Amino acid sequence: MAGWRVGFVLGNPALIYNLKRLKSYLDYGTFTPIQVASIIALESDYSIVEEARDIYGERLEILVEGLNKAGWEVQKPKATMFLWAKIPEDFQHLGSIEFSKLLLTEANVAVAPGIGFGEHGEGYVRFAVVENTKRIRQAVRNIKRFFKKYRQQVAVK
């Protein structure tokens, strides 16, 4: 349920009161199935969290290792399902939107342009490791093939 977030806040009663009033103008609460899923998650065995962590960790390992082998230097994040990657030097002039479009059209890989997350995201793209390992390996192969083709074309010029 990426994007369907649930949270809570504790703190100064006056601030909480004002936050509650503000929230009541912005939305009407959390969708009931999300509330139920949250209760189940909080009351369940922690092993599901460990399993999810291991799945995302493996996917990130494959993505990071593959990108590094393709010549795109990235570092594995410590705890997330996302990889923020600085746009490779020879593509930085494009910016995050154009580079993202290029990856989509030339490598069939979708990434989020960093600028979509604010001005400090420019120069980066964000990968989400929501696909299985087979698809991640395919994406890495596509990127590697695209980089090789692009760099050969530049060398010829």
Image (cartoon, rainbow, N blue to C red):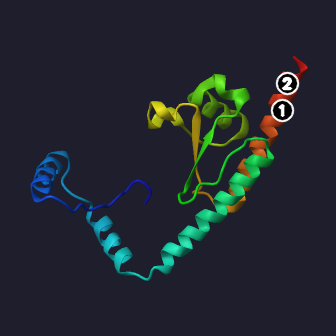
Residue on which the image places disc 1: 149
Give the vertical position of 72 relative to 58 (above or below).
above
Q: Residue furthest front?
A: 12
Q: Pointer 2 and pointer 1: residues touching (CB < 8 Å)?
A: yes
At label 2, counting other C-alpha atoms closer than 10 Å, the crowd grade (few under 14, some 14-19, many 20 or more) is few
Q: Which one is in front, 101 or 96?
A: 96
Q: Which structural element holds mark 2?
A: helix
Residue shown at the point (72%, 43%) measured from the top left: 73
Which quadrant holds residue 31? bottom left
122 left or right of 107? left
Which quadrant holds residue 93? top right
Q: Position of residue 39 (x, y in %)?
A: 31, 74
Give the vertical position of 54 relative to 137 (above or below).
below
Q: Residue furthest right?
A: 156
In the rendered view of the protein, which quadrant contains the C terminus?
top right
Q: Which structural element holds mark 1?
A: helix
Residue shown at the point (46%, 30%) measured from the top left: 119
Residue shown at the point (21%, 63%) measured from the top left: 10
Residue on which the image places disc 2: 153
Q: Which one is in front, 84 or 13?
A: 13
Q: Position of residue 4 (x, y in %)?
A: 37, 57
In the rendered view of the protein, which quadrant contains the N terminus?
bottom left
Q: Position of residue 147 (x, y in %)?
A: 79, 35
2 left or right of 79? left
Inter-mark Cα distance, 2 to 1: 6 Å
Which amino acid lies under the numbered mark 1 shown in the image of this protein?
Answer: Lys
Q: Position of residue 53 (x, y in %)?
A: 55, 68
